[in-house]
Amino acid sequence: MCGMPQQPPVRSTPKRPARPDASMSLLTNVMDHSLDDGYAEATARRRASGQSGLPKTLRAKLGLAAGLVLAALVVTVGAAQARVAAPVVAKEREELIDRIEQETSSADKLEGRVDSLRTDVGNMQREALKKHGGEQGELMGVLSGAVAVHGPGVKLVVDDAKSAESGGGSGPRESAGFSDTGRVRDRDMQRVVNGLWQSGAEAVSINGQRLTALSAIRAAGDAILVDNRPLVPPYTVLAVGDGQRLSTRFQNSPDGLYLHALQENFGIRTSISAQDDIRLPAAPSVIVRTAQPRAEQKGTS
């Protein structure tokens, strides 16, 4: 009986599971073979020939030992010197700090002594003015800035623009040799002060700094200096005089219009108001550079 030919059974072999690091063959090779083949071969040849990295002879061993001892000695001596020098350095530092504190205290005492002597000199000057000049001498002290004053006047505040980044090349600051922005410049304050004097101010101060005939308003970078003292905005200008009249005359003057143009064109912030009573300090020092007694006029018969 002939049947249909049977096909040989198919044997299924289980597949070997894939290594989880099969995709990282390069890293696996580096980890499995960290030593280069050339180094491995060189090490094998040296081992086969009986060579090693350590010295064989007694002289070489003694030299290696001496080198190690010398290195350890250098390290030990350095550590000992550092430990010995540390207290000395700390002591010198403390002595230096003490000297600085002592000198600072002495400088503070001298500065206080200078202020006291300056006050005494100012009092003597005022007494001399009252004795020899009377009312005219007192008026001279006020106008020269030698004495503190108070009375009605105006308060003028000038400040930089909120955004002092946008400059311009036209308007009242067209002739500037540098890029103008919304910052207040020294020449702006010069015009403000001169305008107040011209409008009838009897005494002027900026941020508490009394101005005299010898005062200078200059610039150092972006800072404004008054008698070599830096000022910080906002700039508060106090002027003693007929308050309302002084305010009106200044705003209508060319310098007041100049300040208004700065406000309109560059965003500089200004405000002016009449005050019933403002107080101005005396100038720190009024130096008389040249003086001579006034010749008395002889009466004619």
Image (spheres, rainbow, N blue to C red):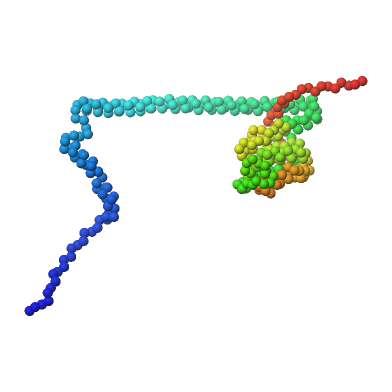
Residue 36 found in image quarter: top left
Residue 188 in sight in this render: yes
User: Closer to the camera, 35 or 271?
Assistant: 35
Q: Quadrant of residue 240?
A: top right
Q: Quadrant of the C terminus?
A: top right
Q: Which residue does the image show at 71% across and 40% down from the upper left?
A: 191
Residue 187 x/y as whole percent: 68, 39
In the rendered image, the vertical position of residue 268 relative to residue 15, given as above or below: above
- Residue under the image location 67 percent in, 25 percent down: 117
Task: Report x, y in % for residue 111.
Answer: 62, 27
Q: Is residue 229 left or right of residue 148?
A: left
Q: Taking the image as drawn, is residue 147 in sight?
A: no
- The residue at 61%/48% (across/down) is 166
In depth, the one of 54 and 142 nearer the eye is: 54
**Outermost residue to the bottom:** 1
The residue lying toward the viewer, choosing from 99 and 284, is 284
Q: Please tell me which residue is depicted at 75% across the width and 30% down the height of the picture.
A: 141
Q: Which quadrant of the figure has residue 153?
A: top right
In screen coordinates, is 20 left or right of 103?
A: left
In the image, residue 31 lies at what x, y percent?
A: 26, 47
Q: From this view, report whether residue 46 is shown above or below residue 298.
A: below
- Vertical relation: 285 (above or below) 20: above
Query: Would you say 207 lies left or right of 64 here?
Result: right
> Left or right: where does residue 211 sit relative to residue 133?
left
